Amino acid sequence: MSTDVVPGVVAVVLVSIATLVIGTWGLRISRTTSDFFVASRTVRPRLNASAIGGEYLSAASFLGVAGLLLTFGAEMLWYPIGWTAGYLVLLVLVAAPLRRSGAYTLPDFAEARLGSRGVRKLCSVLVVGIGWLYLLPQFQGAGVTLRSTIGAPTWAGSLVVAVVVLASVSPGGMRSITFVQAFQYWLKLTALLIPACVLLAVWMADGAADPAAAAPSSWSIPVASPGGGIGLYTTYSLIVATFLGTMGLPHVVVRFYTNPDGRAARRTTLAVLGLLGIFYVLPPVYAALGRIYAPSLVDGGSDVLVLELPSLMVGGAAGAALTGLVTAGAFAAFLSTSSGLTIAVAGVLSQDVTGRRWGSRRLGGVAAFRVAAAIAVVVPLLLSLPARDVAVARTVGLAFAVTASTFAPLLMLGIWWRGLTPAGAVAGLLVGGLGSGFAVAWTLAASPSDGWGSAMLGQPAAWSVPASFLTMVVVSRLTRTSVPAHAGRFMVRLHTPEAVELQR
Amino acid sequence: MSEQPAQRVRVTGPARRRADVVRRVGAREIDAETALGEVFMRSLLREQLFLALRVLLALGTTIGLLPLAFHLFPSLGDVRVGQMPLAWLLLGVLAYPWLVVLGWVYIRRAEDHERDFADLVGSVEDEP
């Protein structure tokens, strides 16, 4: 083993051990099924906001954004803005009512609101599908990171993440993972902040060269290439996908049920906005410095910019220490997002698949959860092994388009419009899900080309979201006799402040 | 049923109810889904929805108009503030505090609405 892999190995081992220790510690205070799924709904806003931040800032945020900014410039700033603004949309439209609905998962919400098993099943399938689509790039990113920092084969990184996630999720469930993820947010922030400060100091000492001077003029224009009508369409479509997609992410939604009440859910969301804002100021720093110090990464391999920039700018032991720090942050990013997704997918699987009666046997709540967690991790792990490299932020962006076209309309209409019917919800979910799903499959399979057709499939949200909304509304109006009898009652529960004591 | 008295066990749980909850006539009107309760709920729902839409409008007319602005006036790409290109300053730094401000304003207003609603529901009792 050569000496330059030491910081990477030390970082990965330390992060894994810290995750397992905190996860095991959670075992001591995690007792009931409710602890497993929603941490018994007693997580305070500040801790919960750190946990949401830790869970949400995936490999796409930690590595992908800086790389995309380096290559494409200001147009990619829409990714971090959209991922943050999504929480503002979630705050004003969904946060408090979703918490007051009192359901565990998205399928629970759909069933409680619409009183239909069919809608529930469709939502379960969508949650599992979206969860796996989102887990896949996390595992792949872990493989790329370990290959870049310690020269391990690609499958090794994926396997390490999968094993650590399973080992930390299975014993303590949601209660313990809350502490793990809160810890990982602060780890990720530190791992990006300290090297950024050092690198900025080095840049100042070098005479503070102008990053934009080395870049084409499109680097300073926040409209997607190639500009013109298509560029404008692509930019706004990305904005729609990220602004609306956040509220439908299964691992984010499940976190809202861990708040004590609707008021705390709002405060948590505001704190998340602040934490994400602090974090997302940093990737552009790496991108700008990369233009000066790492020009060779611009045209290929920009995903490793954050990992390699410290050693390119600072030599010796200090450079190695900084490399270890960013590697630790990247690894924490894979672990925390994968854990959150695993919890969300396992929560749905354990209610609808492993927790059901199979023949004469029926697993208890906690055992069913553990089996479901294993399934939730192993399937995307197996899928990630043969899959070819896809840019991490790209796959994650596609997952946002799918949630924006399915769960966002369901949540928004379900919370604010009494007239939604089960048939309308199913039709809208199918139109949005199949439309955006087809676009995702086509984009991942086909080679990119220019023109409107490619732009509309590559960034489907601008047409698939309105299509889904319109279908839900029109079909609901056509089937208005089947508006659930309890809809009015349920709306009252969603919107009544806690200070007013109703019979629930 | 056994005749033997069971050993006493102290059962405690987290406090579920706040002391200052309003359990008044107004709340019963809503529970019973009367016309009056319906009016209460509809007005709260409309207020909260319009508040949400106003915040989203503020978001759309600031951050949301930036791509259009840079599309219509490409020369904005050359504008610098100090050493920073304008786009990087607006989208990379200033957008985040603005999002927090919007969220903070929303929470204040939404909680005001809910307090007014609780007062309204509570005040029904006082009427003759």
Image: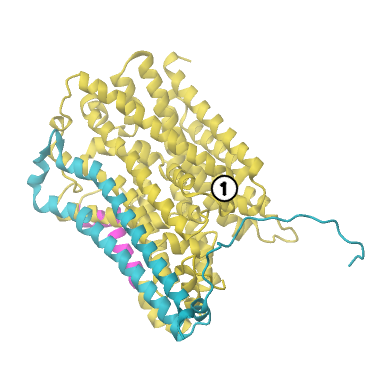
Q: Identify the residue at image location x=33%, y=72%.
A: A470
Question: In the displayed structure, would residue B51 be above or below residue A294?
Answer: below
Q: Is residue A419 visible?
A: no
Q: Identify the residue at image location x=36%, y=75%.
A: A473
Residue B66 picture location, percent across and down: 18, 52
Is B18 inside the magenta-drawn segment? no
Quarter-wise, where is residue A324 in the image? top left
Question: In the displayed structure, would residue A45 be above or below residue A191?
Answer: below
Q: Which chain is yellow?
A: A
Q: Is residue B36 left or right of residue A283?
A: right
Mark 1: which secondary structure?
A: helix
Question: In the displayed structure, would residue A35 be above or below residue A67?
Answer: below
Label 1 is found on which chain of the structure? A
Q: Is residue A312 left or right of residue B31?
A: left
The mark total stands at 1
Query: Which colour represents chain B?
Result: cyan
Quarter-wise, where is residue A306 in the image? top left
| Residue in front for this viewpoint, B105 or B93 | B105
Q: Magenta region, mostly helix, strand or loop?
A: helix
| Residue in front for this viewpoint, A255 or A410 | A255
Q: Which residue is mark 1?
A: A174
| Residue in front for this viewpoint, A398 or A258 | A258
Q: Hey, what amino acid is under mark 1?
A: Met
What segment carries the magenta color? Answer: A451-470
Q: Identify the residue at image location x=33%, y=34%.
A: A303
Q: Is residue B17 left or right of residue A189?
A: right
Q: Is residue B10 visible?
A: yes
